[in-house]
Image (spheres, rainbow, N blue to C red):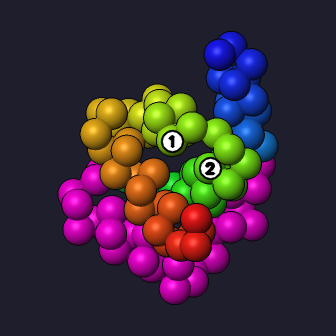
Amino acid sequence: MFTIRVLTAATFATGALLTAATASASPATDALFGALDGLGLPISGPAVITAGNLACDSSTSGLARDLIASRISSEFGLDPGQANQFVGISLAVYCPLR
């Protein structure tokens, strides 16, 4: 359990370094922000794009959705339900075939 948390933290920390590279507008980014806005989730900005991509990458790598949501919750100050919504939206937008 500790190893997974450390791995998750390392993944998100690495993603923070890539924020500038993923901050450009795209149809996927527009879809992510539109869906988050539609649900009233109070988050935006380049870090959200990075977190959305990392949620997809982490899920594809086999990390459990609840662990991803837990990290999202702590990163953005979301409650668990909101964090799960964020993960669901991110998976739908950034890895729809998952």
Q: Amino acid at mark 1?
A: Arg
Q: CA distance from mark 1 to mark 2?
A: 7 Å
Is there CB contact under 8 Å for labels 1 and 2? Answer: yes
Q: Secondary structure at mark 1?
A: helix
Task: Give the residue at x 66% y 23%.
Answer: 5
Q: Quadrant of residue 12?
A: top right
Asked if residue 35 shows in the view, the reply is yes
User: Which residues lie in the magenta part?
Assistant: 15-42
Q: Residue at x 51, y 41 (%)?
A: 65
19 lies left or right of 41: right
Quadrant where the N terminus sits is top right
Residue carrying label 2: 59
Q: Main secondary structure of the magenta part?
A: helix
Location of residue 5 with respect to 67 vertically, above or below? above
Residue 22 bears which disc, if any?
none
Residue type of the residue flagged with mark 2:
Ser
Q: Quadrant of the C terminus?
A: bottom right
| Observer-nearest of 75 and 92 | 92
> As drawn, which residue projects farthest toward the bottom?
27
Where residue 16 appears, as percent x and y from the top left, is: 70, 46
| Mark 1 lies on residue | 65
Residue 39 rendering spot, x and y as whole percentages: 23, 60
Label 1 Cα crowd, 10 Å radius (few <14 / some 14-19 / many 20+): some
Please tell me whether residue 26 is drawn above or below residue 52 in the rendered image: below
Q: Is residue 21 left or right of residue 33?
A: right
User: Where residue 24 sits in the image (x, y, percent)?
Assistant: 63, 76
Image check: 68 left or right of 86?
Answer: right
Q: The residue tagged with tag 2: helix, strand or loop?
A: helix
Indicate yes or no whether the magenta region holds residue 35.
yes
Q: Nearer the viewer, residue 71 or 91?
A: 91
